[in-house]
Each structure stands twice: as structure tokens, then as C-alpha cells.
Image: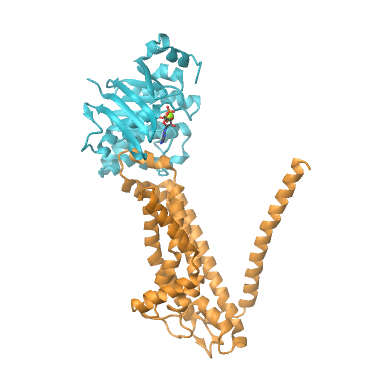
Amino acid sequence: MNKRIKQQIAFWVLRIMSSLVVLFLVLILGFIITKGIGVISWKFLTTMPENGMTEGGIYPAIVGTFCLVGGSMLFAFPIGVMSGIFIHEYAPNGFFKRFVQLMTNNLAGVPSIVFGLFGMSLFVNKLHFGDSILAGSLTLGLLVLPVVIRVTEEALKSVSDSFRLASYGLGANKLQTIWRVVLPIATPNIITGLILSIGRVSGETAPILFTVAAYYLPKLPTSIYDQVMALPYHLYVLSTSGTDIKASRDMAYGTALVLVMIVLLANLLANALRKYLGKKVKMN
Amino acid sequence: MYKIESKNVNLFYGDHHALKDISLQMKANTVTALIGPSGCGKSTYLRLLNRMNDLIDNVRIEGEVLIDNKDIYARGIKIDELRKKVGMVFQKPNPFPKTIYENVAYGLRVNGVSNKNYIEERVTRSLQNAALWEEVKDKLKKSAFELSGGQQQRLCIARALAIEPSILLMDEPASALDPLSTAKIEELIYELKDKYTIVIVTHNMQQAARVSDRTAFFYLGELIEFNDTKEIFTNPNNQRTQNYITGRFG
Ligand SMILES: Nc1ncnc2c1ncn2[C@@H]1O[C@H](COP(=O)(O)OP(=O)(O)O)[C@@H](O)[C@H]1O
Ligand SMILES: [Mg+2]
């Protein structure tokens, strides 16, 4: 078989595989949209569930998910980014650094239900936060911490050393070099970490199960010690253990659609932000 | 009195003995070219002079390096002060992803200068001294990445000049540039000699002959010969120098 034919075959195999991926994505999206679009309305998005969650809206679950995403980011982002900076820029090559990297990698592989249990025993019970936004956010934050750290490390690694050398050569110290040269270049890629973790956090059910999520709570939270409903758990409830599963099936698809849209929107927003910052870096 | 002087310097990267007993003297306002085959220690010697080797793990240095008669490896030496005095230009142009203006201002800012008028004056003056002003004066707020390679390298020179060093180290500053840009850089080096002491690493024999007053030939970490450039190129004392400059090995 000659080289050209082999090349053609390889090209088509790869092409078909990637088309399959796209096909499945479109199928899933299409499925959720066609099933869910019917119940989406302003009322659905802005009112409390009614009648055993078979009617009304999902407003408290949307608000709850936003609270949890915001809370967990508030916790995971500064800590994760700073740890990433420390590990990549400051920690000397050696046992300690490798140990920390090993641990973060392992942490990223721990099943999320384990985080849920851990969060329950530490935040809910030991620290007496109770089932609360605080406990749930901290648990979700822990879950995405390794992602944020890894993304930060990778982003810093991709900054060419020639910029660091130029900065040192002009009499800058390490902090100035990191702050004024390295971080602005790395920021667009670090934003990717934010995208990934927002997607992850808003969709997770297991970590919030024992730490914050309410089965049915038709009111909005007033403090970080309140419980909230959340979209993924609400979806789970509607499709497995609602008062009338058949009757709430449409509500479940509507909830799924809202959840997917939130993740999609977060991705688009973060991507736009990333592009914008990428341009700005070259200009500053 | 010498501007730069190294006395019996040995440098090790771990077990690798990269500089062997190097003693060299350079007078103020001269250009010294460092030549020799790849891996002979030219860049290492250059980085010795602004302590950039400190950034590499497992480097050990013996001997003395004096700048203005002060041992720059002595205890209590402030490295940022040293690097303000000893500017460096790298092989590949490496402007920051910032505006042209901010690239030149960077060294001032990190050294605590905040007076806007002063910064503006230094930026202008440095770009003029680097023979770039006419080409960029209307686009100072544009990204440095919009410049050509040769312009970027002159920007890097301007960036180094902005903090008013007295020594300029250049590591093959023209090796990534086209002939026209190279000629511009060489011309610039010739002009800068009035105010700065310049040490330049180059692979290009003609370039060394054109721009330098003194030439040092390195081979496998040793300083083989150090003399007036004219002598080195017309009447070398050492057979290995002769072989190298006539291109018998490279
Ligand atoms: N960061 C480093 N770590 C270990 N060895 C190095 C390092 N930099 C250079 N060397 C070694 O030191 C020797 C001199 O290198 P260098 O000064 O870069 O040579 P030149 O600039 O003359 O080509 C070479 O053998 C090189 O492999
Ligand atoms: Mg070199």
C-alpha cells in the first residue's frame, strides 16, 4: 500500500472519529433541548416549585447553584492559583515539590462522593456549619482545587523563560517578575481553569448531597448557613424520588436544560474573557 | 584600571567544569568579543558578569569577578543594583508582551522609578540611543510584537539602556536577524561604545573583527588567547586560534 493511500485512510479514520464525538454531543444537546424547551418559561425560571414539584418553577435551585458556584470559586480560586504559583515558581525541585504534585494528582482522582462524605464529617459535623452553603461550597471548592492548581501550573509552565530572564536582567526580583511579566501572560490560560471548575462545580451532585442540598425548600437563602436547593440534585430528585415521577418528568428535562445552558454560558463567557485578556496582554 | 576583571574564575555546572581558570580584563568604553565553538563557555562567561548564572541550579563558582574594582560575588552585594549597572541583550529578541513604551519603561518601574516625566524622557532617550526612535515614535502604545525581529532586538537594547547601565552584555545579538538588521545592530554597537563597556558573544568572525577592540578566544572552557582584535585576526599566537578563525573547525 503506498504512502498516499495510508495517509488518506488515516485522515478519514481520524475525521470520522472526531465527527462521531461531535455527533454525540449534538445528539445529547438536541435531546435535552427538544424535551426541555417546552417547560422553559419566565415563570419556570423565576418561581418556586409547586404542587409536589410537579408544577411551578425551579427558581430556588437556580439561585442555590449560583450560590454554590460562587462560594466554591471564592474559596478554590485564590487558594488554587496561589498554590500553583508557589509550586511552579517557588518550591525548589525536590522531594517536597514532587510530593505536593503527587498529592494534587491523587486528589483529582478521588471520587466525588468521597469528597461529600469528607465534607459532611469535617464541615457539617466537626466544624458545626450544619447543612449549609458554607459547608457545600467548601466541599465543592476542595473538589476543584486540584484542577485549579494543575491549570495554574501548566499556564505558568507555558510562559517562556526568556521573559523571566529579560526581567531579571533588568534588575527585577522574583515577585516583580511573576507579578508584572509571568502572571499577565499566564492569565488567559488560568481563566481556563475557572471555566473547567465552574462546569464541574455546577454539575456535581454527590459532594452537595450531605453538605447543603435540600430536597424541597421553596425559599431563598438569607445567609451562608442556610441550606439551598441546587440544580443537579433537584434533577436527581425529580427523576428518581419526586412525589410523582411521571408528572414531574417534564420539569426534570427543563431543569436539565437550564443546567446545561448555565454551563454552556459560563464556558462562552470565560472563553470570551480569555480571548479579550489574551489581546490585552500584548498591549499593556 | 579595568572596568571588568575576572581572576582565575572556575565555574561548574554540577560536575561539569565549564569555565577553567579564566582571567580577563576589559577597559571602560571598549568592545570585547568572545569567540569560540559552540559549548566552549562564552554564554556562561557572559552570565558570570551579571550573575545570571545564579538562576541556574547547582552552579559553583570559584575565583573573583571585579566590576569597578568591586567583587560582585562578595557578600552584601545587591544583585538588582548589579544588574542595573550591567545590562543584557539576549540571542533571540525577547520583548515583553507589552507596548513598546512599557517595554522600555519596565526596568525603571521595577527599580522604583515612578516619576512620569522622567520615565517618558528616559524612554525617548533610550529609543533614540538604540536607533529605533524614528521608526516607533508614532506607535509607542502599540504592542512590541508588531515590530520586526531586527526592530525587536533594538527595542531590547533600548530596554537595557533605559536604566542607564555602564556595561552592556550581548549574547549573539544578531544571530537571529537578517543581514540588514545585523548591520544596523553592528553600527549601533559602534556608537554605543562611547558610553558603554560592551562584551559581545558572536559566532560571526567578520562581526567580531568589525565591531570589537579586543577579542577573547575560548575553547572547551579555557581562554586560549586574548588580545587586540587586529592581532588575533592577523597574527594569532596560538595554533588553535588560527584554526578557528580560518574556519578549520567550528
Ligand atoms: N544551565 C546549564 N546547565 C548545565 N550545563 C550547562 C548549562 N548551560 C551551559 N552548560 C554547559 O556548559 C558549557 C558551556 O555552555 P555555553 O556557555 O552555553 O557555551 P557557548 O555559549 O560558548 O555555546 C556547555 O558544555 C554546556 O553544555
Ligand atoms: Mg551561547
Q: Which of A72 and B134 is in front in this view?
A: A72
Which quarter of the picture shows residue A150?
A: bottom left
Can the viewer see residue B128 in this picture? no
Q: Quadrant of residue B191?
A: top left
The extreme right residue here reads A1
Q: Looking at the colours in the rendered structure, which chain would you say is drawn in cyan? A: B
Q: Can you see residue A159?
A: yes
The residue at the point 29 percent across, 20 percent down is B25
**Residue A247 image point, x, y percent:** 61, 87
Asked whether, in this view, residue A50 is left or right of residue B52, the answer is: right
Whereabouts is ligand 1, in terms of quadrant?
A: top left
In which quadrant will I find the N terminus of chain A? top right
Residue at 39%, 71% in the rendered image: A138
Q: Is residue B119 above or below residue B188?
A: below
Q: In this view, does B166 lie above or below A234?
A: above
| B57 with respect to A18 (left or right) | left
Image location of residue A57, percent across then percent down: 52, 83
User: On the rendered structure, is A209 left or right of A246?
Assistant: left
Q: Position of residue B61 (x, y in %)?
A: 31, 32
Left or right, A82 with respect to A194, comes to: left
Which quadrant holds residue B174? top left
Residue at the image point whose x is 51% and y is 76% from the top: A231
Q: Which of A66 and A5 is in front in this view?
A: A5
- Indicate the position of residue B112 as horizontal and vertical percent values: 25, 44
Q: Spot the orange chain and give its letter.
A: A
Q: Check the image and name the residue furthest to the bottom.
A: A51
Above or below: residue B113 compared with residue B2: below
